[in-house]
Image (tube, helix red, strand yellow):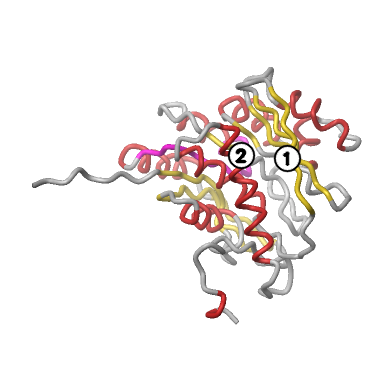
Amino acid sequence: MNRKKKHYRRALTIAGSDPSGGAGIQADLKTFSACGCFGASAIVAVVDENTVGVTGVHPVPAAFVAGQITSVLDDIGADAVKIGMLHSSELIRTVKETLSAYPVKNIVLDPVMVATSGDKLLQDEAVAALKNELVPLARVITPNLPEAEVLLGRRINGWHEFPHAARELSANRRVSVLLKAGHLNGEMLTDVFYNAETDEIIELSSKRIHTKNTHGTGCTLSSAIAAFLAHGMSLGDAVRHAKEYTESAIAAGAEYEIGRGHGPVHHFFRFWNDANND
């Protein structure tokens, strides 16, 4: 008797590689796994970095990136795609053109421009391409405050401007926006989620977790959204579940000492036995 074959929920990440394992491709794949997805990857750059900072970025040729994406989507497919660091306008256009050839609807764009350490990861000329080429292709984008200001070309003067800024970033209500509040001061942080599909502004509040282990937090959040979308959740539910997962990963990772700078979050807090890590 032949049993019906099972199928994985599939998520593809298109991002840079972090050898220290806390951000980029490595964080994305850990997040996909922790959130119940089979993860695939297309590496756009090899980044020389650790918890202290970024030493260098070695780009992968755009045509080779396109080949990686095509190889994955032609064979395995993807229920969701997360896009992270894309350093040049050529690469941004290549990723857009390659993805546009496939019926992938759940695209989560994390407009990575600066590393947690403060190192710049995006060329100036690539900002316009990111804004005009990739943002309209995404289902949801997840900028933090500095990234939102770069995309808007102006300052955001406090949290009271977040709802308006999120709507403005949505490209005429075609793209949903999760505007993250982590760069603001205060013990309570309130992200603003503009759901363009329902035309709703949703406030997502949480208590600040005092820890230096925040390396890869943005990568983790956007990948978790992609993973939950791959599971078939509504956009609103995917964002809420992703925020809860990321907060728990930050809280669990705060208890660890790893590296001399900004350590990673604890992606597998649900599965690891802490007794084995003392």
Q: Residue at x 62, y 48 (%)?
A: 221
Task: Please determine whether, in this image, residue 59 is positioned above or below residue 100.
Answer: below
Q: Nearer the viewer, residue 62 or 186?
A: 186
Q: Residue at x 53, y 34 (%)?
A: 107
Q: Nearer the viewer, residue 86 or 201?
A: 201
Task: Please determine whether, in this image, residue 146 is positioned above or below residue 274.
Answer: above
Residue 140: x and y in percent read: 61, 32
Amino acid type for the residue under numbered disc 2: Val
Residue bearing the label numbered 1:
204
Which is nearer the N-term, disc 1 or disc 2?
1
Residue 153: x and y in percent read: 82, 30
| Residue reaching furthest to the right | 157
User: Is residue 212 left or right of 236 when viewed as pictured?
Assistant: right
Q: Residues within 10 Å of mark 2 (few under 14, many from 20)?
A: many
Q: Residue at x 30, y 41 (%)?
A: 75
Q: Alpha-carbon distance for marks 1 and 2? A: 9 Å
Which residue range is magenta in the image? 77-91
Q: Residue at x 53, y 31 (%)?
A: 234
Residue 46 falls in image quadrant: bottom right
Amino acid type for the residue under numbered disc 1: Leu
- Residue 85 magenta-drawn? yes
Residue 145: x and y in percent read: 79, 41
Q: Nearer the viewer, residue 4 or 134?
A: 4
- Residue 219 magenta-drawn? no
Q: Say which element carries label 1.
A: strand
Q: Which mark is residue 49?
A: none
Q: Which mark is residue 239?
A: 2
Residue 177 falls in image quadrant: top right
> Disc 1 vs disc 2: Cβ atoms closer than 8 Å?
yes
Q: Residues within 10 Å of mark 1 (few under 14, many from 20)?
A: some
Image quadrant for the C terminus? bottom right
